[in-house]
């Protein structure tokens, strides 16, 4: 998994963070992500994130469940094991609707949960590294990706000018990796800068 370099700014007020996100985007820097202790309405729009495709995935999973139920019931009751139940026809679609509905809901729900967990990189034994542990408590954290052309000192000064209290240059592994929380492996080197 590649290790990337980030310039991380910490903000202590939502009212300062919102204009800072807009200013960073206007300046052309690439925002990796913004971590907040609670959801902020409109932040995704300010960051330029596109709308989620989770609802489309849910529809596809639901149709897959409906098709699976319909196909299996049709095969079972008309080909594999046709039973004459009270004179009912072998292809009795109205009687199958509840089962088809239940499989539609099951496939959509389980599929969307697994897709959400994959996209957010949430799973048992998957180790996630925090840019700032206080982002789960009272701090708003903005991580900016730095490549070989990025002038780090210029970005640090820019973040401080838009209201960042603490600015840190760090290297993190952003993808999935399997690990244990009680045996932390040191992946990053932090170089704090004076705010």
Image (cartoon, grey):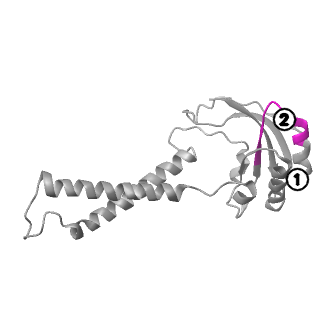
Q: Earlier in the sequence, mark 1 or mark 2?
A: 2
Position of the C terminus, as image quadrant, is top right
132 to 60, vertically: above or below: above
Q: Position of residue 115 (x, y in %)?
A: 50, 49
Query: For this rendering, which residue is in front, 120 or 93?
Result: 93
Left or right for 99, reference 130: left
- In the rendered image, which quarter is residue 41 located in? bottom right
Q: What's the residue at 87%, 41% (across, down)?
A: 155
Residue bounds of the magenta highlight: 142-156
* Residue 192, quarter of picture: top right
Viewed as shown, does residue 170 lie left or right of 116?
Answer: right
Q: Nearer the viewer, residue 40 or 187?
A: 40
Task: Give the label on residue 150, or none.
Answer: 2
Left or right of residue 180: residue 80: left
Identify the residue position indicated by label 1 in the image.
163
Label number found at residue 80: none
Position of the N terminus, as image quadrant, is top right
Q: Nearer the viewer, residue 166 or 75?
A: 75
Q: Is residue 105 magenta?
A: no
Q: Quadrant of residue 143?
A: top right
x then y, percent, for residue 105: 38, 61
């Amino acid at each position: 998994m590649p290790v990337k370099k980030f310039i991380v700014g910490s903000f202590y007020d939502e009212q300062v963070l919102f204009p800072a996100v807009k200013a960073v985007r206007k300046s052309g820097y690439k925002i990796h992500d913004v971590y907040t202790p609670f959801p902020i309405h409109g932040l995704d729009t300010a960051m330029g994130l596109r709308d989620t495709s989770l609802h489309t995935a849910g529809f596809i999973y639901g149709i897959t469940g409906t098709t699976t139920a319909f196909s299996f019931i049709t095969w079972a009751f008309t080909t594999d094991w046709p039973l004459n139940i009270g004179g009912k026809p072998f292809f009795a679609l109205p009687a199958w609707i509840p089962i088809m509905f239940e499989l539609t809901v099951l496939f959509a729900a389980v599929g969307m949960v697994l897709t959400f967990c994959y996209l957010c990189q949430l799973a048992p034994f998957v180790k996630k590294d925090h840019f700032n542990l206080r982002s789960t408590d009272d701090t708003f954290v903005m991580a900016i990706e730095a490549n070989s052309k990025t002038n780090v000192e210029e970005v640090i000064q820019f973040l401080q000018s838009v209201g960042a209290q603490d600015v840190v240059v760090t290297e993190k592994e952003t993808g999935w990796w399997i690990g244990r929380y009680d045996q932390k492996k040191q992946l990053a080197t932090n170089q704090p800068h004076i705010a």
